[in-house]
Image (cartoon, rainbow, N blue to C red):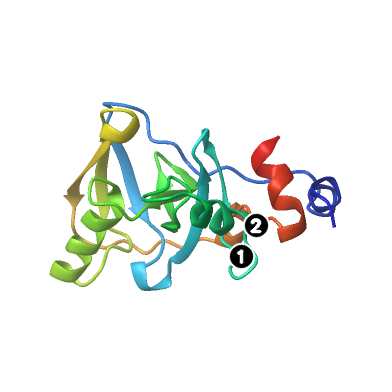
Amino acid sequence: MGLRDFQARRGGFKPQAYRFPADYPVQVQFARELTDALYVVEHSNPDNWTQWAECTFPECYGCEQNRATVGWSDWAQRPRLYIDARIDGSLEVICQTLTPSMLAPKLEAYYLQHGTICGILFNVTRTGQGKKTKYLLDPVDDSPRPLTSNLRLRDYLTSIPYAAQEHYYNK
């Protein structure tokens, strides 16, 4: 199956994950616990960081590119967290890598200390840009409020069949 066939089968539409504005606090209330979030290993195109897809190891174009590079490679696998939340009144999906400066480790620390993130109201602020991006997580109200979501986190993934991956990354 080629990339066009794959996109046509999906209806050509993929919902987009939420992008935090720079230097502006946003009120966020998570709809599920970290234990119920979706964790996925993905590859990013080093020439276009907005282009990433789920790793399909053992047959995976990103893994092949990573093995073909001597030393450290920008094609390396990256774990990502997908979690849904109410952001300024609307349900959104947040997608974050699991690096120290991102949101996920701060959520994990809060969860380990308090036992929950679900329904807690936080201010989240993104600062910096590019590889210097950092996220600040500040609880506003730590009394949990019930929140439900019917968003399917897998709908926000980019899953490309192996036969179409080279075309996807090189288009």
Q: Secondary structure at mark 1?
A: loop
- For label 2, the crowd category at 10 Å Cα-Cα, with few meaning under 14, some 14 to 19 and many 20 or more, is some
Which of the pair 86/152 is nearer the observer? 152
- In percent of width and height, residue 29 lies at 34, 52
Q: Which residue is mark 2?
A: 159
Q: Is residue 20 visible?
A: yes
Residue shown at the point (26%, 33%) measured from the top left? 132
Label 1 vs label 2, nearer the camera:
1
Q: Closer to the N terminus: mark 1 or mark 2?
A: 1
- In percent of width and height, residue 95 lies at 44, 50
Q: Which residue is mark 1?
A: 56
Quadrant of the drawing holding the C terminus: top right
Identify which amino acid the numbered label 1 is placed on. Thr
Residue shown at the point (63%, 55%) measured from the top left? 61
Residue 118 position by quadrant: bottom left
Decide: is 47 above or below 162. above
Residue extending farthest front: 70
Identify which amino acid the numbered label 2 is placed on. Ser
Q: Secondary structure at mark 2?
A: loop
Decide: is 152 above or below 102. below
